[in-house]
Image: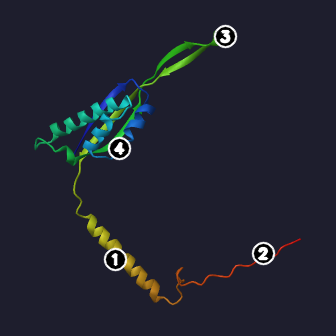
Amino acid sequence: MEARAINRYVGTSPRKMRLVIDLIRGRGVEEALNTLHFSPKHAARTAEKVLRSAISNFQNKDEAGRVDPSELFVKSVFVDGGPMLKRISPAPMGRAYRIRKRSHHITIIVARREERKAEPARRKKAAGTTASAKATAQAKPGAKQTASKAKPKPKKQASKKP
């Protein structure tokens, strides 16, 4: 199960927010909250609010009631560009420069960590295939020699030209 929170029309540029959210992507919720809380970036405050909202949404969505935050992790985080306010700044020689005041939408999705029991079986299967591959390589008489058995070739001396 997962829950999400979206904050739209945030008044900072998407590029500044992406610097902050790259720090929390895929991490546990407690670690992400600590990272955002102690980050010196101004965008971290907004991201922290949205993350807290996503956690609250998850707890409201869960039928069992209270959820331990250590079980949750940040499944995905992304920032989309919002509308731009276009302003004009005076420039030399009667010209005008355009100022683009950017905004963005931030979305955070949190989910519960699930213990995977199928992983050890995959590891055993992978380990078994490598052992059998080694046995077949040793059984073939025309197999290449390994680096430890190969003899080093003597180096040729370069002839000196006058």
CA distance for labels 2 and 4: 56 Å
Q: Which amino acid does label 2 sit on?
A: Ala
For the residues marked 1 and 2, what is the alpha-carbon distance in whole angstroms? Answer: 49 Å
The tag earlier along the polypeptide, 1 or 3, is 3
Question: Circle 2 is placed at which residue position?
Answer: 158
Residue topped by disc 4: 25
Q: Residue 128 carries which label?
A: 1
Residue highlighted by disc 3:
93
Q: In this view, does 145 lie above or below 50?
A: below
* Residue type indicated by callout 1: Gly
Contact, CB < 8 Å: mark 1 with mark 2? no
In the rendering, at what x and y percent does residue 151 appear? 60, 84
Q: What residue type is labelled 3?
A: Met
Where disc 4 sits, the SS reads loop
Instruction: Give the mark nearer the N terminus: 1 vs 2.
Output: 1
**Which quadrant holds residue 111?**
top left
Q: How many numbered callouts?
A: 4
- Above or below residue 143? Residue 56 is above
Residue 8 left/right relative to 1: right
The residue carrying pointer 4 sits among few (fewer than 14), some (14 to 19) or many (20 or more) residues within 10 Å by Cα, namely some
Q: Nearer the viewer, residue 131 or 146?
A: 146
